[in-house]
Image (spheres, rainbow, N blue to C red):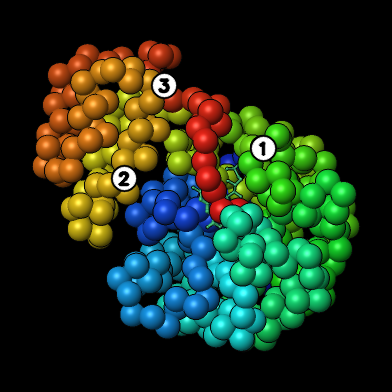
Amino acid sequence: MQIGPYALTPRRADLPILTLAPMAGVGNWVYRLICARLGAQIVGVEFINCRTIGTASRKSEWQLDFSDAALYEETGISLLAAQIYGNDIDLIAAGAREFERRGAQIVDINFGCSVPQILRRGSGAAYLRDLDRLYEAVYATVQAVNVPVTVKTRIGWDDADINILEVVRRCEEAGAQAIAIHARTVVQKYKGSAAWEWIARAKEAAQIPVIGNGDVFSVEDARRMQSETDCDGVMIGRAAMANPWIFSGRDGASLSECIDLALEQLEYMAQYKGERVGVMETRKHLALYFKHLPRSSQMRQRLLTSDSLAELVDLLKEWKDHTPLPHDRSDLVLTQREADALAWGGNG
Ligand SMILES: Cc1cc2nc3c(=O)[nH]c(=O)nc-3n(C[C@H](O)[C@H](O)[C@H](O)COP(=O)(O)O)c2cc1C
């Protein structure tokens, strides 16, 4: 897959090119780095409102911290795709310039968000109802930066208005270098299943790379999406939250690996965002990494309620040291499908 100057080939012959989906509240540098190390070839930054980019808030500084990009640049293990959204095209273009200045290797525009407040303001997937505006936003952004501009979108507004083929054409004309397609309509949000056949049709029509997205919960799903649609890459969201090992072609990890990852993530997040926020934001991952624990178990209660980094670290270390856990116990291996059972309120 060629995205502007970047030539990407699969990490392994038996895997497609796998990328981490942009996810609000998830795609910070700690998690991006974890996924990149495990094999995600593009890592998505959570979407950033074009209006907040100039503001000096702590949140916006965290969001705009693309310091991991330097490491990707140096090692070539991944590419950082920073995502922008908004309803003001000049601000999108200006924001894209700021992303580039801060090291983003790709600027991605969000035309897929289906959250009502965002749609009401004419942002996210609202652009799917006005393709001239969508074209202008892509064109202005492409003109504003030197790095490649990509787009992430859905297949259309609703079943009666699936316009992804037209969207692909307009994005290409405006200079986009790739398009990621979450194969659901806006009205669908997360209901039903992703209609991969639209990824296949878009790929057939497209001149630029098409990255398929939606309902990939296992390594086998990723392979199947590629073989059924011929897409150039496979983007993974929810499944990666529960199992970042999916990027190395594994449908889960042993308990001891989960504990090691949890420890690392907690420690980095606490350093990065401070103990309170860092621990709080890592909780959703802990709940997923250790979802095999019965709801009533004391370990689960403590893992998901403690605010103290030291307590969590002790707890996890003790667990690892004192529980004789063979690596191959299937009941202790996380499965990707379980992630699907969770009710996400995602933005894309
Ligand atoms: C918690 C969460 C946050 C999300 N935030 C974003 C976002 O900021 N930008 C975006 O384009 N999509 C966002 N999405 C949508 C995902 O990128 C992806 O398109 C969607 O989850 C479908 O892929 P999946 O089936 O692999 O999860 C989000 C999804 C989730 C679950």
Q: Residue at x 52, y 41 (%)?
A: 344
Tell me the distance, in whole angstroms, between the alpha carbons under discs 1 and 2.
26 Å
- Left or right, 176 with reference to 78: right
Disc 3 residue: CB within 8 Å of ligand 1 = no
Q: Nearer the viewer, residue 55 or 17?
A: 55
Residue tagged 3: 333
Residue 149, image x, y percentages: 64, 72
- Left or right, 141 with reference to 317: right
Q: Nearer the viewer, mark 3 or mark 1?
A: 1
Residue 65, image x, y percentages: 37, 69
Q: Is residue 180 visible?
A: yes
Q: Residue at x 44, y 36 (%)?
A: 242
> What numbered label is drawn on residue 191?
1
How many marks can you see?
Answer: 3
Which tag, 3 or 1, sits closer to the chain's start?
Answer: 1
Residue tagged 2: 282
